Image (cartoon, rainbow, N blue to C red):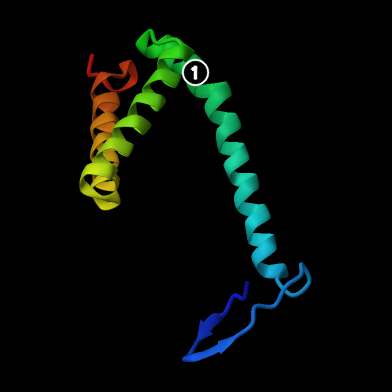
Amino acid sequence: MTVAVVEAGAARAPVLGLRANAAQFSLLVLVNAFVGAMVGMERSILAPLAEVEFGLNEFAGYLAVAASALLAGVVADAFGAGAAVWLVAALTLLSGVTVALRMRETLRR
């Protein structure tokens, strides 16, 4: 199997190895570190916050993630990936607005 990289109209073979691709590998490590930190914060902070603020337990959060992934898959199969991305964006906006309007800290007293 041969892989060719097209750059400025000329095909050349990819350069393999960590030393040759140190910049890309460093970026990959950095992105993975940030993703790991976000997942850790989400699991340690958001689950208790959701329970206190909205009365939702951790299972409800996992169920919501599973249901939204299933919905996005069905929409992507029916209408394409672009429609699924727009659906997820719209639902994210709706949930953000809902949280902003319903959280005790943002309610006027």
- Of residues 66 and 50, the one nearer the viewer is 66
Quick check: 98 above or below 81? above
Which corner quadrant holds the C terminus?
Answer: top left
Whether residue 76 sits left or right of residue 7 in the image: it is left
- Identify the residue at image location x=52%, y=28%: 42
| Count of marks placed on residues | 1
Residue furthest front in the image: 1
x and y percentages locating residue 14 in the rendered image: 65, 78
x and y percentages locating residue 33 in the rendered image: 65, 46
Residue type at numbered disc 1: Ala
x and y percentages locating residue 51 in the rendered image: 44, 11
Q: Tag 1: Cα neighbours inside 10 Å, few (<14), some, or many (≥20)?
A: some
Circle 1 is placed at which residue position?
A: 47
x and y percentages locating residue 13 in the rendered image: 64, 82
Quick check: 84 above or below 20? above
Which SS class for mark 1? helix
- Identify the residue at image location x=24%, y=25%: 98
Whether residue 13 sits left or right of residue 99 in the image: it is right
Whether residue 75 sits left or right of residue 105 in the image: it is left
